[in-house]
Image (cartoon, coloured by chain):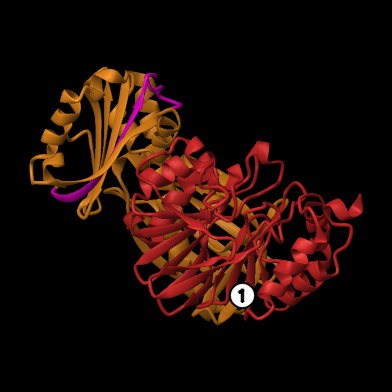
Amino acid sequence: MGYKSVKAIFSIDKAVVDHLLEMLKDKEFIISSLPCVVARFSNKILLRFSRLFLFRVDDVYSLDIEQIDKGTVIKLFGEKSTVTLIFRLLENDKIEYVGEYNGPKQWVVVPCLEDIGRSVIKDVAEEARRRSVERSHTAAGADYSALLAKVSWVSKLLLRSVLIKSEIVAINKGNLISYIEDLASEGVLSKYKTVYVSGTSDIGSFRMLFISGELVGVYSLIRGKEYVGDDKVLNEFEGFTRIRVYGSNVEPSIDGG
Amino acid sequence: MGIRVHRPYIIAEKDDHRFIWLGLDEAEAERGILTNQYLIVDKNEGLLIDPGGQYVFERIYRNVSEFIEPENIKAVFFSHQDPDVVGSLIMISDFFPNAEIYVSKLWTRFLPHLGVIEGVVMKEIPDEGTDIIVGKTSLKAIPAHYLHSPGNFSLYDPKVKVLFSGDIGAAVFPEGTWYLFVDDFKTHVKYMEGFHKRYIPTKRALDIWLNKIKELDINIIAPQHGAIFAEKNVKKFLDWLRNLDNVGLDSI
């Protein structure tokens, strides 16, 4: 038996800060965010830690959450070990994370601790963004660009649409707009109440939404960076681009695509 | 609230080849029939296995993106045509735009009813099976007809010796229980028995499949529902199937 810990500092978006402590109180959310969960039995979970795919350690844990000043302590009480995860808000949108392990197989478990902290924070950030988008919609109507960033919302939009066109187009830099103008001249934008256009090329992907012929939302992911509501970055797209155009005669709803 | 485990888990790995389980969501409507989705990554190419329906798609997309760029998903394998296998086809075609869809030739004419007519490359799997190349690995689609669908395939990954068995090995957990790997085989049989005796039409179909896979070197059997069989439980599971009786029509 022995005790060992790791420490890390994670950066988070400002928008996440407001939601962080609230989410870290939610036991179900924590469990769904933990890597290495391979079984659940009523109120307990089985964590399987492995190293180099040759060595593994299993233990069944119960989970307890305790609030501290500007932070949360998550305690996992196992049959053979204890794992403690401490998250504390710092200044400048940083989180201090300490992962502790008290048990017999430190050399297998301790290297996994940083990954556990990172995984929880990553899920918190995504969930926070989802909640913040939802709150902004209720406050100020639909922000379709933000909704286009949500896979679940786009999924529902697609389920209510038909695929009108799918093609691979050679786009010159700055000329994506010409493709959209062609869609308008072909009558696609006026034929359907809602038109969703998605595209993928070597530099990234974009999503555009038109309602009654007007562009109401734009989302792009270019070289790993997200752009929400910025239609100028569409000029970055060039080269062979796979474009799909979907139409629907129903206006999308905020909560249901 | 149902069980949610949203983090993926690598079930087998060798060099730059990985076989990954993609998490789970237990919806109320599933009544405990949890679905497993898997991803195979070889070098910089990926294949998705039975990616499931609409409500699991966001998790699938997010977890896939942790391992590989969505544009590098080159293939999607559908073991058969059930909605919990193919239901997200329209999202797959949009979010994984370079994926070719591998499915039994029996079902290619039905899938367009999911709203995908253009822009999807359908690769019909002939009755005798086919090879699917991902990265530098040749995966084997092995006939598993009538288990339970008449056009049905398993998928063997020779690099890490994992057999994706589709509905063969499916289990229905009691409420509040879930595990990824079978530990207590005797208890697990209770969760499998009902499915195999009701959904599979005849023992003959199982015998044919068992004969087809008998030469394969298998370390892990990964089903679409229920838990994964590894190490000694692979043999226990195959022996159990071999001795199963009163299957489907045989019991009438």
Chain ID at mark 1: A
- Residue A252: in magenta span: yes
Where residue B88 sits: x, y (%)? 49, 43
**Which residue is at 36% across, 43% downward?**
B94
Where residue B192 sits: x, y (%)? 78, 57
> Total label count?
1
Instruction: Give whichever of A11, B184 is nearer the camera.
Output: B184
- Visual hue assigned to chain A: orange
Where residue A81 sits: x, y (%)? 64, 70
Secondary element at tag 1: strand
Q: Quadrant of the N terminus of chain A?
A: bottom right
Left or right: A199 as drawn, with respect to A72: left
Residue type at tag 1: Val
Where residue A45 sits: x, y (%)? 66, 58
B58 lies above or below B126: above
Instruction: Give whichever of B185, A81 is nearer the camera.
Output: B185
**Which residue is at 56% across, 49% downward?**
A66
Left or right: B169 as drawn, with respect to A178: right
What is the quadrant of residue B117 in the picture? top left
A252 lies above or below A119: above
- Residue corresponding to mark 1: A57
- Residue B161: in magenta span: no
> Which stretch appears magenta?
A238-257
- Visual hue assigned to chain B: red
Instruction: Give whichever of A74, A138 is nearer the camera.
Output: A138
